[in-house]
């Protein structure tokens, strides 16, 4: 089974905690880094980490560089890294806006952040589809 | 040969005929033969009227000879036929000849061929007549002549049609009869002639009167006319009726004015609609992200607490309750801010005369605690005494800007300057600080609602302050922007209309 290298960008610490717990429990992802916003992510990327993530899961609303800023920036600096956007929004236009901005896809966050299991499976399927299992 | 009168007879270029008392030719000279084509022998003894091609006419005496006898001279002219039957125009001067005792002995007829001269005259006459007829018959242009004093001396068909007067109505009248009363009172007709006299021509478009008193829009050209010696002999006046064109132009202008106004109204309505649309879109985004987030957090912690209770992990409850309360608190603040923000656009905008210094003093007063805590130095230097606008909103504007200047300091004591001056008919305000500054890529983003550059743990806030500032300034038909040089703090610039 393919294990994807993942970086998580989410400003809410509690949310990020439950999110990464679910990813780790699935055994399908290796988490290379967890960041509070785009500034922290790009700082890490520019510091030449030993391994680059294959995909980045990014929240949209964050202080400083937000999700759209990340898609916009990585489109040119790291075009090979697939960005998947996520947020509480279930509005169709949000997904379209993300894909226009350069995201591979958009997944709505679960209703409560202690229930990330289904979300993790959905992202795994999407990753297999876009990046090859 | 001696010089004698015979030589005249023989050599004169004019034809000379000597006639007896009855009008019969006795002799003629060589020039006479050359003109008529008859030699002397052919016509001697014939009535002089032979040169009129009346060879068999028994009447010898003519009216001309009678008159010559009575008045000692008679000059006549007319077409004659040569022997070869070609035509020529002859001028013949008859003189009676008397002997010493005053007795009539005969006549002398002096003949000149003036065909060429006469033809020129005929051509001229013909062309003059042609032009006169043409001018008279032109229907679309009123063409008439004025004498040097401005009285009408000729009139054409076009003038009759345009102005409604017949030639009999107007010949001899002063041309001012075609002008509206106000023009006559202003001496316009005489002035037009004066211009034509001094510059050769006067041209204009204006209202003129018809015989029935109705007005028409005329194109008028008055040209000074000079005789061969260069003396002014009068004026020609050409008038065209352009009323229809004038009316069309007016109608076109009116309709284009109307459409321009309509387009303007549409454009205003359109921009109002799109701004409402943008606000709606923004509101959707706000509800779906910013407001949903804390609700979801509260809900998540409630579920988590439920799990804690199920699992008898009571020691973990306290932490989750605290986080839930903080999330609920954040939600409360967000709703308040959003209401505050939407109030800015909903409440009717006041237009009051405001003392600028008082307004800024009020904003500083509202921030009293923060000023004291941060030990801030605020320098106010207003070069503008008054401004018109909504007091509550403008105080809020400066309060938010000053509040930011006190907040984003990285621990340093804030030094803030508020300045204002007149610029391009607007009032420019600048709020300048010595704080952490703003990187260039964020200078526009900071005005977006709920947009934050820092974690709440570092600089608390909810990302509404500058969005409110932008909205207040835009409602006052102004502009706001931020500038920041690296390491030199930030400055916020506002341009507001003076009135």
Image: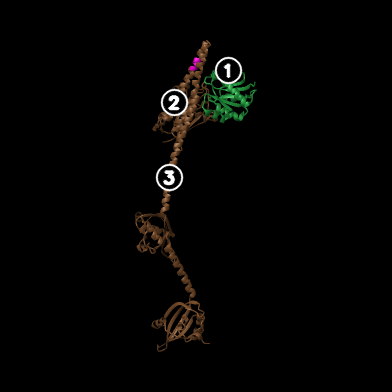
Chain colours: A green, B brown
Query: Quarter-wise, where is residue B339 in the image?
Result: top left
Q: Give the letter of the chain under mark 1.
A: A
Q: Main secondary structure of the magenta part?
A: helix
Please name whichever residue, A58 or B420, is drawn nearer the observer in this view of the structure: A58
Q: Residue at x 46, y 69 (%)?
A: B124
Indicate which disc residue B257 carries: 3
Side of B169 where A93 appears, left or right: right
Residue B449 in view, yes or no: no
Side of A35 where B243 appears, left or right: left
Number of the front mark, 1 or 2: 1
Please name whichever residue, B282 or B344, is drawn nearer the observer in this view of the structure: B282
Which residues fall within the magenta stretch? B320-324
Residue denoted by label 1:
A21
Q: Give the letter of the chain under mark 2.
A: B
Instruction: Judge whether B218 appears above or below B353 on screen.
Output: below
Q: Give the letter of the chain under mark 3.
A: B
Q: Is residue A132 magenta?
A: no
Please name whichever residue, B495 or B102, is drawn nearer the observer in this view of the structure: B102
């Amino acid at each position: 089974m393919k294990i994807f290298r993942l970086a998580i960008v989410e400003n809410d610490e509690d949310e990020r905690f439950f999110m990464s717990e679910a990813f780790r429990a699935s055994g399908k992802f290796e988490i290379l880094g967890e960041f509070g916003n785009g500034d922290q992510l790009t700082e890490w990327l520019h510091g030449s980490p030993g391994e680059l993530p294959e995909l980045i899961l990014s929240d949209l609303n964050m202080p400083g560089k937000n999700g759209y800023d990340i898609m916009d920036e990585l489109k040119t600096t790291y075009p090979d890294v697939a960005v998947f956007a996520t947020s509480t929004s279930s509005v169709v236009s949000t997904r379209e806006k993300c894909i226009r901005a350069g995201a591979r896809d958009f997944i709505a966050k679960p209703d409560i952040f202690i229930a990330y299991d289904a979300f993790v499976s959905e992202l795994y399927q999407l990753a297999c589809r876009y990046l090859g299992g | 040969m001696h010089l004698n009168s015979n030589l005249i007879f023989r050599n004169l270029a004019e034809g000379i005929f000597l006639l007896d008392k009855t009008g019969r030719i006795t002799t003629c000279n060589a020039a006479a033969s050359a003109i008529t084509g008859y030699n002397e022998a052919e016509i001697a003894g014939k009535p002089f009227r032979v040169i009129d091609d009346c060879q068999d006419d028994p009447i010898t005496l003519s009216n001309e000879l009678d008159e010559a006898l009575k008045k000692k001279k008679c000059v006549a002219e007319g077409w004659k036929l040569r022997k070869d039957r070609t035509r020529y125009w002859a001028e013949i001067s008859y003189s009676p000849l008397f002997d010493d005792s005053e007795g009539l002995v005969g006549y002398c007829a002096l003949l000149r061929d003036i065909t060429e001269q006469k033809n020129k005259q005929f051509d001229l006459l013909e062309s003059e007549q042609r032009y006169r007829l043409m001018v008279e018959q032109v229907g679309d242009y009123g063409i008439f002549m004025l004498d040097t004093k401005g009285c009408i001396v000729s009139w054409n068909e076009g003038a009759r049609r345009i102005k409604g007067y017949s030639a009999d109505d107007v010949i001899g009248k002063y041309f001012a009869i075609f002008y509206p009363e106000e023009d006559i009172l202003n001496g316009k007709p005489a002035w037009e002639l004066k211009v034509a006299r001094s510059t050769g021509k006067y041209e204009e478009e204006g209202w003129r009167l018809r015989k029935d008193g109705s007005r028409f829009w005329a194109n008028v050209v008055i040209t000074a006319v000079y005789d061969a010696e260069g003396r002014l002999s009068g004026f020609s006046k050409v008038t065209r009726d352009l009323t229809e064109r004038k009316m069309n132009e007016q109608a076109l202008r009116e309709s284009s004015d109307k459409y321009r106004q309509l387009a303007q109204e549409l454009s205003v309505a359109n921009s109002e609609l799109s701004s409402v649309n943008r606000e709606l879109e923004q509101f959707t985004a706000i509800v779906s992200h910013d407001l949903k987030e804390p609700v979801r957090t509260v809900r998540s912690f409630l579920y988590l607490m439920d799990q804690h209770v199920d699992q008898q992990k009571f020691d973990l409850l306290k932490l989750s309750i605290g986080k839930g309360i903080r999330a609920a608190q954040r939600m409360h603040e967000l709703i308040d801010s959003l209401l505050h923000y939407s109030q800015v656009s909903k409440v009717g905008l006041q237009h009051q005369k405001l003392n600028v210094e008082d307004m800024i003093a009020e904003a500083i007063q509202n921030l009293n605690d923060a000023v004291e805590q941060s030990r801030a130095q605020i320098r106010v230097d207003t070069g503008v005494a008054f401004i018109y606008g909504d007091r509550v909103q403008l105080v809020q504007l400066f309060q938010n800007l000053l509040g930011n200047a006190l907040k984003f300091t990285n621990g340093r004591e804030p030094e803030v300057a508020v300045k204002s001056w007149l610029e391009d008919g607007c009032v420019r305000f600048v709020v300048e600080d010595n704080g952490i500054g703003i990187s260039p890529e964020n200078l526009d983003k900071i005005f977006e609602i709920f947009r934050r550059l820092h974690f709440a743990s570092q600089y608390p806030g909810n990302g509404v302050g500058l969005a409110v500032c932008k909205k207040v300034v835009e409602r006052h038909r102004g502009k706001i922007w931020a500038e920041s040089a690296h390491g030199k703090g930030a400055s916020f610039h506002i341009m507001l209309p003076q009135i």
